[in-house]
Amino acid sequence: MMKLCKTLVMAAALAALGLGGGARADDLTQTITLRNLPGNSYLGSDENTVLEFYIGPQAHINTMSWDVTLTAYQGSLLSLAYMALGDSQSNSQLYFLPAQIADPDGSYHPGTGHYVGSVDFRSVDEPGWGIVDLSFSLNDDGILRLEFAENMDELPGADALWNKVTLTFGYSVSAVPEPASAGLMLLGLGVAGAAARRRQRLTPGA
């Protein structure tokens, strides 16, 4: 089971629970492995660990699988540690709480836990809503942004440590470029054509 929250532009957060699922055969995949990342404070705090990874322009994030070892320090709780993932501008954002996903009623304690699972964002079963699509697209910069945060800031410094994190994202790319991308592509082809013609003129006997 997975508890997520997707924040839409100028809209309220949508809480969701969903059954996990791995990447489909037609998805591209990218795996990220991280170690010893502190989670310090509330989302958006300058104290938090923020990482950015290049996936691809307008890549659409469909699935995520995880293998996470997480430690909550004494005075904090495993259930409070989460990772926000979304595009570089945080216009589309999901909140990933591995301890609460694994044990919704029993993760309210410090210590270390190991969590493994997966989710298909395209088909999340939300009680009261039915099947909802929480997949999202990256911006033209192709950046996937991860922020490691806390639901409550209970300790000075880090409240939790993400000891080891392995994430595999399944994503798709559009076969037809967006209008702006198509324009750039046509411009690029035009430049290439002009360069080819110039080379022909400079070739003796051409």
Image (spheres, grey):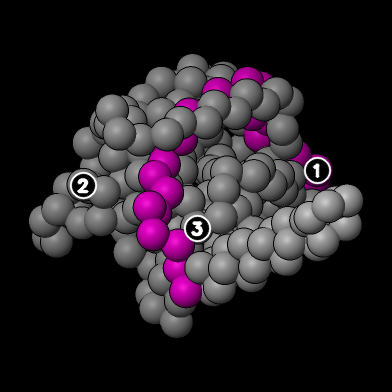
Residue 25: give its label: none
Q: Secondary structure at mark 3?
A: loop
Count of labels shown?
3
Pointer 2 with pointer 3, Cβ within 8 A: no
Circle nearer the N terminus (2, 1):
2
- Give the extent of the magenta segment: 153-179
In the displayed image of the protein, which residue is found farthest to the bottom? 10
* Depth check, front residue: 199 or 105: 199
Q: Characterize the local packing of mark 2: few (<14), some (14-19) or many (20 or more) Cα atoms within 10 angstroms.
A: some
At 52% across and 31% down in the image, what residue appears? 30
Residue 157: give its label: 1
Position of residue 56 measured from the top left corner of the image (x, y, whole percent): 57, 48
Q: CA distance from mark 1 to mark 3?
A: 36 Å
Circle 3: residue type: Gln
Residue 21 position by quadrant: top left
Mark 2 lies on residue: 123
Q: Is residue 204 magenta?
A: no
Mark 3 lies on residue: 58
Q: CA distance from mark 2 to mark 1?
A: 37 Å
Pointer 1 with pointer 3, Cβ within 8 A: no
- Which mark lies nearer to you, 1 or 3? 3
Position of residue 20 measured from the top left corner of the image (x, y, whole percent): 27, 33
* Depth check, front residue: 162 or 91: 91
Residue 32 position by quadrant: top right
Which quadrant is home to the C terminus? Answer: bottom right
Circle 1: residue type: Gly
